[in-house]
Image (spheres, rainbow, N blue to C red):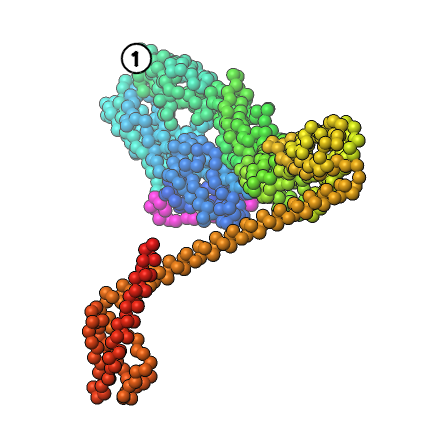
Amino acid sequence: MFVITASTKRLNCDQSRGQLMHRFFQWRVLFIMAVYSISNINAQIRYSVPEEMKKGSLIGNIAHDLGLDVQKLRAGRARIVSGDSTEYVELKTDKGILVVKERIDREQLCAETTPCSFTFEIILDNPMELHHVTVEILDVNDHSPTFAKEEINLEISESATPGARFLLGSADDPDVGVNALQNYIMSPNDYFILKEHSRPDGVKYAEMVLQKPLDREQHPRLSLILTAVDGGNPQRSGKIKIEVNVLDANDNAPVFNQSVYRATIEENSPKGTYITTVNASDADSGMYSLISYSFANLKGNINNVFEIDEKTGVITLTGLLDYEKAKKYEISIEAKDQGGLGNSAKVIVDLIDVNDNAPVISVMSFFTPVPEDAPVGTTIAIFNAKDVDAGDNGQVVCTVDQNTPFKLQSSLRNYYTLVTDAALDRERVSDYNITITATDSGSPALSSQKTLNMKVSDINDNPPRFQKSVYTAYVTENNSPGLSIFTLSAQDDDWNQNARISYLLDETTVGGSPVSSFISVNADSGVVHALRGFDYEQMKSVRVCVKAQDGGSPPLSTNVTLDIIIQDQNDNAPQVLYPVQTGGSVVAEIVPRVADVGYLVTKVVAVDVDSGQNAWLSYKLQKATDRALFEVGLQNGEIRTVRQVTDKDAVKQKLTVVVEDNGQPSRSAVVSINVAVADSFPEVLSEFTDFTHEKQYNDNLTFYLVLALAAVSFLFITCVVVIISVKIYRWRQSRFLYQSNLPVIPYYPPHYADTGVTGTLPHGYNYEVCMTTDSRKSDCKFSTLGGQSVLVVDPSFTETMQRAMKEKNFMEENSLSELVR
């Protein structure tokens, strides 16, 4: 522990009120710092400021005084907590200073209590620090002394002897210290002097002392001025007028039977409660023996709390008593006779505290949520519990619920720290309603409660959990790709992201191939899908390992095994192993003609690669040359004779056996068996050789017949299409030739010769022939292009042309007729 004190004083001779306040402005800072834990620092700081400071005025640089930088104040969320004092001061965390928040009136805040101060706490988080700050309010001379009355009337007998004392009472000044009432001044006169006295409580009062006898005939009435002056700067004062009436002789002043009266009364007593009775006597007789009682000083609110009967001196309660505001009252009682002589006594009223105030719990810091892995002893909240009652009534004991993992620790009086007393588990209890009970030691005891709702934040401390370690799923072979096989589901007791589960397929191999080529797992839903169709005959089961991983940091995971059992489907027909079916040769079983009934001819051996009832085989005889001669065992496939073989039975016997499985639907295989009924092998060989040749011949004949038919049909269709196409083409040419006006180039016999050398024809001439539909009946005239040569036409040319045209027309008509047919 170490103590640092620093004080500065600023004085100003200006008489203005604001500068006067600064004249008494005195900073006194007291540091008492004590470290009581690694993360908790307790410091006590004291500031002194004058009252009536303007809003925003500086109180102190709290950051500098605590040895903290402004950044730490911000980071630690520095704040003011506890009590009603927060309405007077404000913490500026951006500058690290304390300033005045509201006007402070010392007289309203503390009344007569000195020194006047209020206390509050400044708390910081991360790490937690608690600092006590006390602000003392210095008095400013803002009140003038005042008297309870505007005028004092005294009636003094002219027979009063010098030295007689007359009480003038006291003036009230709410200020304290040098600003309080200092002395009295009375206006100059020839008869009285002023005496000042102080009571044990420090109240100064005045009395007049008679210096020389009064003469009623000369001065029946005297007017004096009494001035009460304080010690402030500027000085303030209050005045009262004293009117003295000189009466006839009054020799004796009242005398109290005791100088100090004591009374006790409980606070909160009802109005009208009897306090005590003061008693004074006067040796005079007549009207001068009549005494009246009154309060000599009315400091504070005494006149509102107590009342005295002027005649009997009985003091009763007229107001409310509060031990927490005033623990006792000192009352000055004045007794006066009718002649103006008086005396005084003091009544001390002690208040008895009553347990009328329950403890008050003020939470200064509360941390929520708290991680579930917080170690035992983690601070949850800091609070204080105060009871303004006195003695045992103000002794507070705080408790917390017993059925919670918390406890209270106290390092300072009335200050408590709520800490964890056991490990927290959010999965078991996610939040706590912590009830703190503060109970005083009064009788009857009073208590108050404060409930704190603390939430427990989740920590990723629980891995995903499956109900089983091994799951079994069944899927029928030949399934479609993408089929949903199974849904894996895991639970995680954590919350939010820590409980978000992803499913991951562990990469292993199945039959030399990665399992991911067979199976996929949806990462979000845990649905297992088949990526390909399974074949029971190749793979009976698949074992995969799936990891369920949460979204925590670091993530936690759990593995589970999924056995996928592939169920057989009747997708394979039986396969005949014996007799062996060959494509080019015939195998025959020989049955001697002397075979008895039940003779074993052969046995059909078949297998089915399916399993279960899909592989149960049954054998049936489908066809037979002679059904009365052979039978097939239903279960074993044995072919036996059912009767005696005779000479009438054919040598060649053909049997067709159906092998059928028991699946749904069933599948089957057919096998043909040749049986020879003969006693010698050459006979069997000759019979089956012919059978083979005939069978092969018949097969070849059928093939050639089908091939020839297809070829003939193709040729016929092709010829028909070609003929029709040609006919249509010729018909369209003939109609074009007869009906159009286009020029026609005729055919010229080779014996015609030209006589010129121009043109593109082989003989040097070009000819243009213009013909109409009747051109066959007209003559043709030809001319050369140049008009210089003339073609001489033989008369036989016309006949030749006509004959050619007739032949052409005849052929076209025949073609059209054929086309129409």
Q: Specify the segment rendered in magenta.
A: 1-20
Q: Looking at the image, which is closer to me, 808 or 338?
A: 808
- Position in image of residue 803 (x %, y %): 28, 71
Q: In the structure shown, which secondary structural element does the residue marked by tag 1 occupy?
A: helix
The residue that mark 1 highlights is 287
Q: Looking at the image, which is closer to me, 696 or 92?
A: 696
Left or right of 88, for residue 626: right
Q: Amino acid at mark 1?
A: Met
* Label 1: few (<14), some (14–19) or many (≥20) C-alpha neighbours in 10 Å: few
Residue at image location 62% in from the left, 41% down from the top: 534
Left or right of 79, for residue 786: left
- Position in image of residue 784 (x %, y %): 23, 84
Q: Among all residues in the image, which is located at the extreme top?
A: 286
Left or right of 621, for residue 392: left
Q: Which image quarter: residue 413?
A: top right
709 shown above or below 614: below
Residue at image location 26% in from the left, 78% down from the top: 796
Where the C terminus falls, by quadrant?
bottom left
Residue at image location 37% in from the left, 32% down from the top: 173
- Magenta-colored stretch includes residue 3: yes
